[in-house]
Amino acid sequence: MAPATRLCTAVLPLRQASATAAKSGLASRAVRAIHHQPAQPAKVVPVYGTGPPPEPPTPSLEYTDATARIARRRRQAELLKQAKEVRAAATARNAQSKSGIAPSSTQQKSTGLKKRFWKEVSVQEVDGALQVHLDSRPLRHPTTKKIVRLPLSKYALATALAIEWDQLVSAQEATRQHLIPLTSLVCRAVDIEADDAAHPGAEKSTAPIRSAIASVLIRYLDTDSLLCWAPSVDPNDPANPSSTFNDAGQSLREVQEENAMPIVSYLTTRVWPGVTIAPVLDDNSIVPRQQEPGAREVVMGWILGLSSWELAGLERATLGGKSLLVAARLVVEWSEGGAGVLSGEVVDEAGPRFGTEEAARAVSVEVEWQTGRWGEVEDTHDVEKEDVRRQFGSVVLLVSGQGPKA
């Protein structure tokens, strides 16, 4: 018999019994329930978490073998190239259908950008400045169309700029800023210099570009990645992530303090004397706290007093590393003008200089700590690591120079 049939058979006698009992005055008697077993409460089993945390996942052979990884990236690059060609062809067809231009003229126009109209790139000294020449044509600003002129002391920057243009294979690539990052950085410095020239004297600090950059950069002082430290070790909670130690027996907070203290000490003694720089996060807070008002005023005045090349380099380094302090340390170390270092201070040439690698490690302490525990994500952490070093290296080229000859 089906379950539904049995249920109906069980229910009908109960209803008949109830009706009979009601007629006979026995309605107060309990009616037998369908279910014979009494209801029981659910048993909640506690979760016992014992032992060390699980090991990080092991990448497959495709991601560990260099040959397989290179082959996979080549396939991806080829697929991207094919997709771009299909998209460009579709765009050209839409343009032809809307404007009524003949296919031959459109094709001629598109192939013109695909060709490289220069053969050689050189650095030449013209009228007391360095210029990058594409054959006989000087490199010009993409917006103002003025010739890009570099100081004679920045020959390394001019050479790197020439190499960047020599690596381009078409004129179309020159219209993409991500393919000419050094050119965009130099043009940023040239724009700041032109804006300062339009506001001479005391009005220089109120120039639109300079004041806008300073107002953006000063915000990083309150959320500086160099000063965002992990909570202190909790001896009562060994399972807390902040209580994890590395091979040297140090916690993440101790590593961050050891990394930040030399940079902060250098800046508060040589660049901003008398200024106190404090961590921006407390142990039990996720909201950053602002630095003292006096510190903000001093740092703001220092930013407004930088040269156009130093200010452009400070902006690029701050945005690249999310740290104003590391950017200031890097600019001060390599600037040919000193970038506001106190007179009489001499940089210790015997010791190691604060360069690209040191700056990149300073802004990546927590990332390296976490990837050391859980592993790197391919095409994410490795790309970001190289991109930070590339941006810091461009800043070193921008602000450094040989200095005036005696």
Image: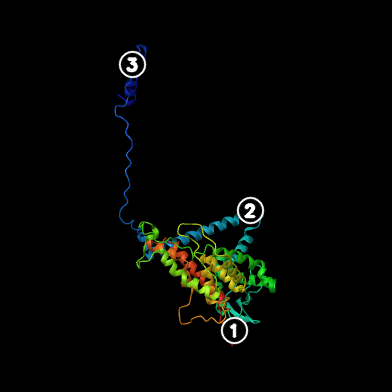
Location of residue 318 (image quadrant): bottom right
Badge 3: residue crowd in 10 Å (few <14, some 14–19, many ≥20): some
Badge 1: residue crowd in 10 Å (few <14, some 14–19, many ≥20): few
- Left of 47 or right of it: where is 201? right
Along the viewing direction, whichever of 125 and 215 lies nearer the viewer: 215
Three-letter code, disc 1 = Pro
Choose the circle earlier in sequence order: 2 or 1.
2
- Residue lying at the far bottom of the rendered structure: 406
Location of residue 118 (image quadrant): bottom right
Q: Which residue is mark 1?
A: 404
Q: Which residue is mark 2?
A: 97
What's the residue at 63%, 55% (across, down)?
96
Three-letter code, disc 3 = Ala
Is residue 301 positioned above or below 45 on the image?
below
Mark 2–mark 1 distance (CA, rounded to whole Å): 59 Å
Mark 2–mark 3 distance (CA, rounded to whole Å): 85 Å
Residue 112 can be seen, yes or no: no
Along the viewing direction, whichever of 57 and 55 lies nearer the viewer: 55
Residue 333 can be seen, yes or no: yes
Q: Which residue is mark 3?
A: 17
Tally of marks: 3
